[in-house]
Every structure is written in C-alpha cells, then in structure tokens.
Amino acid sequence: MMNQRVIKLLVLILIIGMFGFFGYSLVTKGKNTDVGDQAYHFKLPNYDGGTTNLTDYKGKVVLVNYFASWCAPCKEEFPELAAFQKDYGTKYPLLMINRGETIDRIKKVTNNNKEGMLYLFDYNAKVAKRFNVSGQPETFVIDNQGIIREHYNGPITEMQLYNWAKKYDK
C-alpha cells in the first residue's frame, strides 16, 4: 500500500517536471537564432574601446567567428582568419567575438592586434546565447539581407570563408 503511494507520487512529480521543462522550452525558444533566421542585431564593445553594431554592416555579407585565446583549434585556424582578413576583410567584414576574456588578455595574445582583426567582446555571453554558440571556434555567415546562412563548428580555412562569402553576396 505504501509502495503504491510512493510510486504514484513519483509519477506525478515526473509528469509535473516534464510539463515544466516543455513549458520553459517553449517560452525561451523564440530568443535563439540559427540558420535561416534573421541574425540577432547585437552591439558589443570592441578592441579599440568603442562599440560595434552588426547593423554597421547592413547590406554586406558578414562573417562572425567565436573564439577563445586558450582554445587550441582557435589558435590553429587563426592564420587562416588573418589571411582572410588581409585578402578580403574590406569587402567581407570578419567579426572576431571573444566571450569572457578581457581586452588586455587579447592584446597580449595577439601582439597588440598586429593582424588588424576586428575583435568584439561578449563578456556575459548574451549574444553567444542568441546565436546558439556551443563552443569555439564557431563561425556564422550572415548574408547581405541579415539572414544567417551558415553555422559551422570547428576550425575553418580562408577558402571556406571566401567561398561562403561569395556564395551569399548577391
């Protein structure tokens, strides 16, 4: 008799928990963006001490790369990103977003930004959450209409970036 009561109580708690979880999922679902969605219009502090808005690049194909200075794959891909910045950065802006590290830390590991990259800082990971960033490196391609067209996890090459930028530059 006691066992049946405990089982019924546990089942009831489980059902209530499931409804709570699914309800929460539905409520928070609309806040994230991914491929095919309009990109979240962010405004973040930049390397130079000012702020950069995604809307500053309206009408352009924009590449967004999430990275961390301690991330080995990020370090591997950096020469490719630097080459892309040098060869195509004026036509296709590459926004390098760091979450959680300080500007001083990035200045130190980049030799005071000798490559001329556009570093932005997502200190509280608010933008990362909106873009469903799960790690780093992670790269997004946003077309000239502001739609996210690619979301790639892992290191990337200059040619991959260029091919995507060209593909969505219409």
Image (spheres, grey):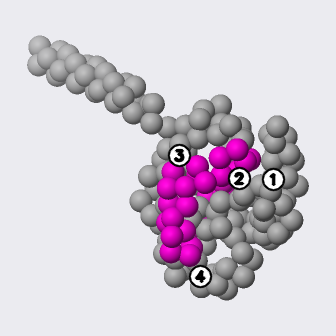
Q: How many angstroms separate mark 3 from mark 2 (CA)? A: 14 Å
Ranked by sequence position, the earlier of labels 3 and 2 is 3
Q: Magenta span covers which residues? A: 42-68
Q: Residue at x 49, y 44 (%)?
A: 130
Foreground mark, 3 or 1, reads: 3
Query: Looking at the picture, how far across and down is residue 84, in whole percent?
Result: 82, 63
Query: Looking at the picture, how far across and down is residue 72, in whole percent?
Result: 68, 69
How packed is label 2: few (under 14 Cα within 10 Å), some, or many (20 or more)?
A: many
Q: Quadrant of the C terminus?
A: top right
Q: Which residue is mark 2?
A: 63
Q: Residue at x 50, y 56 (%)?
A: 43
In the displayed structure, would residue 102 be above or below residue 21?
Answer: below
Q: How many angstroms separate mark 1 from mark 2 (CA)? A: 8 Å
Q: Amino acid at mark 3?
A: His
Query: Cβ–Cβ below 8 Å for labels 3 and 2?
Result: no
Visible residue check, residue 112: yes
Ranked by sequence position, the earlier of labels 1 and 2 is 2
Q: Amino acid at mark 4?
A: Lys
Q: Residue at x 74, y 47 (%)?
A: 61
Q: Amino acid at mark 2?
A: Leu
Q: Which residue is mark 4?
A: 107
Q: Residue 21's image quarter?
A: top left
Q: Which residue is mark 3?
A: 41
Q: How many angstroms separate mark 2 from mark 4 (CA)? A: 21 Å
Ranked by sequence position, the earlier of labels 4 and 3 is 3
Q: How many angstroms separate mark 1 from mark 4 (CA)? A: 24 Å
Q: Quadrant of the N terminus?
A: top left
- What number is the disc on residue 161? 1
Query: Cβ–Cβ below 8 Å for labels 1 and 2?
Result: yes
Q: Amino acid at mark 1?
A: Leu
